Image: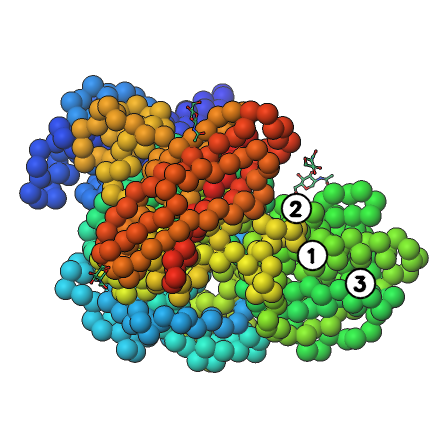
Amino acid sequence: MASSMMILVLVQLITLSTLISADLETYIVHLDSIKGQQFFQKQDRENWYQSFLPRTATAGPADVQEPTMVFAYHNVLSGFAAKLSSEHVKAMKNKDGFLYARPQRMYMKHTTHTPNFLGLYQTLGFWGGSNYGKGVIIGVLDTGTTPGHPSFDDYGVPPPPAKWKGKCEVEGCNNKLIGLRDLTTGENGTRFDQDGHGTHTSSTAAGNFVKDANVFGNAKGTAVGMAPLAHVAMYKVCTVLDCPESAIIAGLDAAVEDGVDVLSLSLGGGSQPFYQDGIAIGALRAIQKGIFVACSAANAGPAKSTLSNEAPWILTVGASTIDRKIVATVSLGNKELLDGESLFQPKDFPQTYLPLVYPGLNGDQNASLCMAGSLDHIDVKGKVVVCDRGVIARLDKGQTVKNAGGAAMILVNQVEDGDTTLADAHVLPASHVGYKQGVAIKAYMSLFAYPTATLLFRGTVIGVDSAPAVSSFSSRGPSLASPGILKPDIIGPGVSVLAAWPVSVENNTQTSSTFNMMSGTSMSCPHLAGIAALLKAAHPSWSPAAIKSAMMTTANQVSLNGNPIEDEREVRADIFAIGSGHVNPTKANEPGLVFDIEPDDYIPYLCGLGYTSLEVRIIVQTKEVSCSETIPEGQLNYPSYAMTLAKGENKTYSRTVTNVGEANSTYTISVKNVAVPVGIVVVVPNPTLKFTQKYQKLTYDLTFRRNSNEEVNVTYGQGAVAWGSSKYLVRTPFVIKFV
Ligand SMILES: *[C@@H]1O[C@H](CO)[C@@H](O)[C@H](O)[C@H]1NC(C)=O
Ligand SMILES: *[C@@H]1O[C@H](CO)[C@@H](O)[C@H](O)[C@H]1NC(C)=O
Ligand SMILES: *[C@@H]1O[C@H](CO)[C@@H](O)[C@H](O)[C@H]1NC(C)=O
Ligand SMILES: *[C@@H]1O[C@H](CO)[C@@H](O)[C@H](O)[C@H]1NC(C)=O
Ligand SMILES: *[C@@H]1O[C@H](CO)[C@@H](O)[C@H](O)[C@H]1NC(C)=O
Ligand SMILES: *[C@@H]1O[C@H](CO)[C@@H](O)[C@H](O)[C@H]1NC(C)=O
């Protein structure tokens, strides 16, 4: 009797808890701003939003189903985020003014999870000219930041401009860190940035000069962000775990209202149609207000079509190497030396040859990856253990080897990782080597019955002249959301970047000057955001599209050794890896010509993507949209081209350039076919542009033609056209997919 009662109670509990947890989800709800009245008070708008939330009359257990408002948006979205059931959403659809609702997505930070450390930032030639970004406000959406860190000292930084309306929710803000707001709900703990990611990205964008930055004594130098005299406003939208879309939109909403000039988002979800992507929607409202938006491209490379943040109004940033490595050389028993990297460089590692073991030798995949528990039945005590990269975090592999009693780890790239190695703070002596080096190590092991190895820690090496090279993890195009726009737009430093960190990774409690090294497009994005701030300071009248154009048309095509920029396979990086190329801040300051885009120009473009007028209105928000006018993607005034061409087909696109160089200047065009098969012709009806005034605009056409009698045996062809004057070179790359 008693036991059957028990069971009954248990069943009831389960039913109830299923109701509570399963039914309510956070939805993003779009309302028709035209139907809504003019709101003079925020409260009035919120009341209007509230009127959409269905009320449940009954009391009792049904109370848990009551819909609740999570965020009311005022600037970047006409609508709100609320915890709703699908029944609630159904009920809302009948209300006048309802446009669209969907469950929010979870976005991710774009770093590898493993911290690294590394050296100095290069000083930039036009720092002085841009006044180090003085007066510009960079809004960063991330995991929070660390007030009081020396990177956020405000030495030399003036008070924020009068337009600044933001606020600081914690103690410790100053003229450098002018805002800090938490849009996440209920992360535990006391430190504002529990993760470190946001401290790193915000100091990369605009950290002040900090002398003698180093970790473990490595890479000693002055750490400084791209725009050291700019202001930083942090909007905490990510927890340690993830970044809810409703919080990201709330961060964008607050940043636009507060008056930021530049936004940096090192986070994203997978490719989505733009009307279902909170970042794309919020970013369009930001650029409508003249705010520049840079986003990370994601870390899902080197496979094709792995990008996040593909909207053409966003600068989509891929990641490349810098000219520094922290070298840990593998010395094999046959005296062969193979360079790898590690941040942790113990001085006391014995230089005697130790037994070398590859736990994956018998075909056990988990053991080859050094997954937790997989080494339990393998004798690795006192040995150097070879682990394949992938599946789990790199530092965790080292922990597994250490737990199993291994003396050291050699972390070996898989074929797709190529030669991209990272200087990680491993928990034991280690070296991360490239794919080729790994093959050599395994070949050596197969030839000798008792293979041995040791590690030689050789510290920081500067002047690696293969840099910049595109990292293997940097996400690649083509864009899925808009294949007719070339993405990523640009690449910048994103491998083993040194920047501020909330705590000492060395457990040094004597200093507040704590740094760490991280890798990811999360690290390259704030570099470009900081450079955008410098350009904004130097050219206050330039639009977001003009700043973006200036960076793209002047980007570098070659690495320090003068050869074309390579990817992780050590072959020429293709256009879907580098976009326009590697950012060159000094040249971006004097681009000669810019391809400008007005926010309204995106409307016919969005209509041309095949979106319904409702879907376009969700994105554009401010206007009734009829989609009576459409343009193909290639007709947007973008500083690059991506198109398909069938046999015998030709496509003509026009572009309008604005002269931001010398008033009297003449440009002539040249076409450089990097890898375009025979039979592709670029026709330039008018190969000269003659300007007589500054800010004068001139329009030209290009026709891309594919002959009908030539066979093409590749999928893509790529090249570039460049307008050259006596002073400037304005380069626009193109890619053609053969269909
Ligand atoms: C709260 O802290 C615990 C223990 O540190 C952790 O497991 C959990 O993920 C944290 N919760 C959030 C929301 O960060
Ligand atoms: C390998 O590891 C995964 C994840 O830990 C586990 O699910 C799987 O069972 C393991 N495979 C073997 C063969 O042990
Ligand atoms: C720092 O302290 C933690 C916890 O005591 C320890 O696990 C870790 O090995 C230490 N790290 C270093 C670099 O000493
Ligand atoms: C493009 O194709 C059209 C239609 O086939 C043709 O009339 C035109 O001459 C072509 N233009 C160029 C520049 O080849
Ligand atoms: C540009 O050239 C025109 C005619 O060649 C001349 O009249 C004008 O003064 C020049 N403007 C500048 C700014 O040099
Ligand atoms: C494609 O054609 C070119 C030149 O016609 C030739 O050199 C190349 O080997 C061909 N590639 C393939 C994959 O057939």
Identify the residue shown where x is 54% and y is 44%.
Answer: 673
Alpha carbons under labels 3 and 2: distance apart = 27 Å
Q: Which amino acid lies under the numbered mark 1 shown in the image of this protein?
A: Gly
Task: Identify the secondary structure beneath mark 3.
Answer: loop
Query: Is the C-beta separation of discs 2 and 1 under 8 Å?
Result: no
The mark that comes first in sequence, 3 or 2, is 3
Q: Which amino acid lies under the numbered mark 3 shown in the image of this protein?
A: Lys
The image's mark for residue 163 is none
Closer to the camera: disc 3 or disc 2?
2
Identify the residue shown where x is 72% and y is 68%.
Answer: 329
Question: Residue 727 location, x and y as percent?
Answer: 38, 63
Alpha carbons under labels 2 and 1: distance apart = 10 Å
| Residue 476 visible to the viewer | no
| Frontmost residue, 32 versus 665 | 665
Alpha carbons under labels 1 and 3: distance apart = 21 Å
Residue lying at the far right in this picture: please name it. Answer: 449
Identify the residue shown where x is 39% and y is 45%.
Answer: 687
Task: Identify the secondary structure beneath mark 1.
Answer: loop
Q: Which amino acid lies under the numbered mark 2 shown in the image of this protein?
A: Glu
Q: Quadrant of residue 207?
A: bottom left
Q: Which residue is mark 1?
A: 434
| Frontmost residue, 235 versus 8 | 235
Q: Which residue is mark 2?
A: 416
Question: Residue 76 location, x and y as percent?
Answer: 24, 42
* Horizontal relation, residue 120 to residue 39: left or right: right
Question: Residue 526 location, x and y as percent?
Answer: 40, 58
- Assign the C terminus to one quadrant of the image: top right
Callout 2: few (<14), some (14-19), or many (20+) C-alpha neighbours within 10 Å?
some
Q: Quadrant of residue 506?
A: bottom right
Closer to the camera: disc 1 or disc 3?
1
The mark that comes first in sequence, 1 or 3, is 3
The image's mark for residue 383 is 3
